[in-house]
Image (spheres, rainbow, N blue to C red):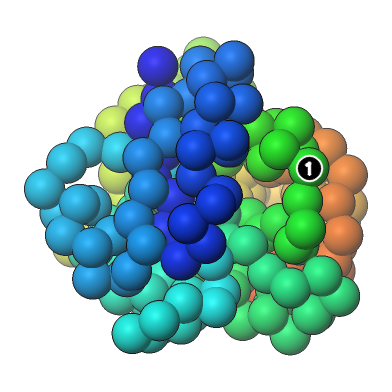
Amino acid sequence: MHRILLIDDDEQLAAPLAAYLKRFDFELANALRPSEGLARLRAEVFDAAILDVMLPEMDGFELCRTIRKESDIPIVMLTARGELTDRVVGLELGADDYLPKPFEPRELAARLHTVLRRQRRLPAANASQSQRLVFDGLEVDLERRQVLRHGEALTLTGTEFELLALLAGEPQKVFSRDEILNRLRGHDADLYTRAVDILVSRLRKKLEP
């Protein structure tokens, strides 16, 4: 069973959501404040985190930024419906997916399955030939999901690693944005173009120079 941490100050949300997600093999724990959530993430083992944008102490963006400094755990952001800026900022800070509020619990379960599958999946491209892709100054270990840049280990989110493995596995192929989304997400989603652009930008910053 996958352990998920929900960080949301809505005291009425966690109990019914936990009961629903249990049907999909998720064990949901919750924290009402960011400080409590960070403490639990540091002390316990979770497979993914769900962050609300509107939180006391610090907003969900600052919380996402703090988590990303310490962990590559998959993160799903809960954003206000129609707030495109919130979704863009969340992706820029390292969130793996987003879900507008109010949301259907079944869609949240689907998003969680997607980010968890992405986190553990081995890229199919060239996997049968080699579990390591080596370039000038860059090594991608597909089995251990590790990336070395000039011998230094990089910290990538699961989505960033999947994108790098996808591109590195077929270095002469040009991928469209739709192809990248279909390979990484496995389902249609909003914010097509911007999501890919943000993901590529994040990966470039980590790979440079």
Residue 86 placement: quadrant:
bottom right
| Quarter containing the N terminus | top left
Query: Residue 93's spot in the image, x, y percent?
Result: 49, 76
Residue lying furthest front: 12
Is there any visible trace of residue 11 in the rendered image? Answer: yes
Residue 120 vs residue 6, the one in the foreground: 6
Identity of the amino acid at label 1?
Glu
Q: Nearer the viewer, residue 161 or 208?
A: 161
Q: Residue at x 74, y 62 (%)?
A: 101
Q: Describe residue 172's horizontal placement relative to residue 60 as left or right.
A: right
Q: Residue 111's spot in the image, x, y percent?
A: 67, 40
Q: Position of residue 87 (x, y in %)?
A: 70, 73
Tell me if residue 67 comes above or below residue 139 in the rendering: below
Residue in the image at 59% along x and 15% along y: 23
Which residue was labeled with disc 1? 104
**On-image quarter of the C terminus:** bottom left
Residue ID at (54%, 26%): 19
